[in-house]
Image (cartoon, rainbow, N blue to C red):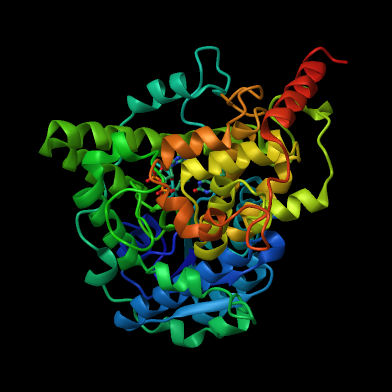
Amino acid sequence: MAKGAAIIWFRKDLRLADQPAVSAALALGGPVVGVYVWSPEEEGGWPPGAAARVWLHEALVDLDRSLRRRGARLVLRRGGTADELLEVAKQTGAKSIFWTRRYEPWSIQQEAEVEKALSHVGLQTRSFQGNLLHEPDQVRTGSGTPYRVFTPYWRAVEKLDVAKPEATDASADRSWGQAWKKAASLSIDSFELRPAVRWDRGILERWDISEQGAHTALSRFLKDKAADYARQRDLLAVGESEGEPGDGASRLSPYMHWGQISVRRVWHETLHRASRSATTRLGCEAWRRQLAWREFAHHVLFHFPWTLDQPLNRSFSSFPWRNDDKHLRAWQRGRTGYPIVDAGMRQLWTTGWMHNRARMIVGSFLTKDLRIHWLEGARWFWDTLVDADAANNTFGWQWVSGCGADAAPYFRVLSPASQEKKFDPQGRYVRRWVAESRAPRGTDAYPQPIVDHARVREAAIRAWRAMSKGE
Ligand SMILES: Cc1cc2nc3c(=O)[nH]c(=O)nc-3n(C[C@H](O)[C@H](O)[C@H](O)COP(=O)(O)OP(=O)(O)OC[C@H]3O[C@@H](n4cnc5c(N)ncnc54)[C@H](O)[C@@H]3O)c2cc1C
């Protein structure tokens, strides 16, 4: 590889530790320039939503701060990625460029364009696997097709070695040099990622949006929650503390989505922790199995990129979804009159995150009780989740609405009342997010249920039967 300055093109890998692109660039021994290009037009019609932009802003501030501690800066650009990278290469005299691969269809195309433009002028390029445990096309079924069912996928993936994280932090050991000074950079504020009306306080108060925050979240999970994960992962409220109830989940999803922590490190740390006790081993195994759903979702999107807006199960193309703006708005605002549904939607709105069990409950309610298209749900989540992820979100919505890979059958309609009893038995989750639901019904404070669950459940199943018979 050539000497001279090297560029790291940061993407969904906003960290310095255990970051193969960073280590490879620094290993060359020349100056290294970190660049982030804000190019929402290149995100295939799915540019980061409002909550994700809030996260991105803070993550860029944090990455820049970390680089400053190492005597460098994050160079920020806005525009066509290939052109901006070429310009930075020209300004800094860079000879090579490194990045971490992404796998959404538009990212694959973007990388191909960047690769072509840069190698055309003689720059050396190299990309790395750094956001997943395995490449999404690493495993295939016996007949050579992609997996559509999780369990055999997991059996195949479980056998693969996961690369070990780097033992030392290369970003702190080596010099970054001064080449970044020659590159023109915008300010982070000029990207306008933060909302003009500051509705984002609920997010900022609850999350430490930094690389350090990601490591703290992992340590806390391992110390306080891993042993109980298998038993508690579905509960919406655990612990005794007053106020906002905690839960058994790790809340690592946004950190992994933005690449603020390396997934292989997380994997190996849970393996290491598992040796503590039999229950910790069970908890860590259950957690790694969940992490494998993330891998599976990427496998599915990689092989079936059209599932971003089309059902994997094609027979759902003729499903009679309902257009109903009033019901959609009630769902979005957490005013359906079903406390457990509304609690989930309000947790999402306030914190930018929702518990997995609640995602399943609100998803079932939208697509089965209200029979509204799963894409409406996916789009709302896209705008409001800090962990909004094309693979996981598409997969989750198709799974919950019965039209995706290994999906919950459409006729299995979750009953809000039974879900509440089972997963929020003391009502703490509902009390926290929908306190007024405990007041007399029909007052201004809390609406009557917008539909009758028993009746709409039957209607949904009839619609599904008719679709299945091709009526
Ligand atoms: C309708 C719907 C939409 C979803 N949208 C997203 C999304 O946009 N982004 C996202 O990261 N996750 C999404 N999920 C998956 C899951 O709800 C979240 O990953 C999880 O709630 C994140 O919290 P956690 O990190 O505390 O999870 P934990 O319970 O601690 O699980 C650990 C990790 O495993 C992975 N994981 C767990 N469950 C799933 C799952 N069902 N599918 C894929 N990966 C999983 C996540 O990376 C998660 O961080 C969605 C699920 C549903 C049902």
The image shows residue 41, relative to residue 367, as above or below, that is: below
Residue at (11%, 39%) from the top-left corner? 276
Q: Would residue 137 be seen by someone viewing this image from the given angle?
A: yes
Which residue is at the far front? Answer: 440
The image shows residue 381, relative to residue 231, as above or below, that is: below
Tell me the quarter of the picture where residue 280 sits. top left
x, y (%) of residue 285? 28, 32
Which residue is at the far right? Answer: 471
x, y (%) of residue 49? 63, 62
In the depicted view, which residue is nearer to us: 424 or 292?
A: 424
x, y (%) of residue 145? 58, 19
Q: Which quarter of the figure is the C terminus placed in?
A: top right
- With 323 as the anchor, is 188 left or right in this view? left
Residue at (21%, 51%) from the top-left corner? 224
Residue at (36%, 47%) from the top-left corner? 249
Tell me the quarter of the picture where residue 279 sits. top left
In the depicted view, which residue is nearer to us: 353 or 436?
A: 436
Tell me the quarter of the picture where residue 44 sits. bottom right
In the depicted view, which residue is nearer to us: 185 or 25?
A: 185
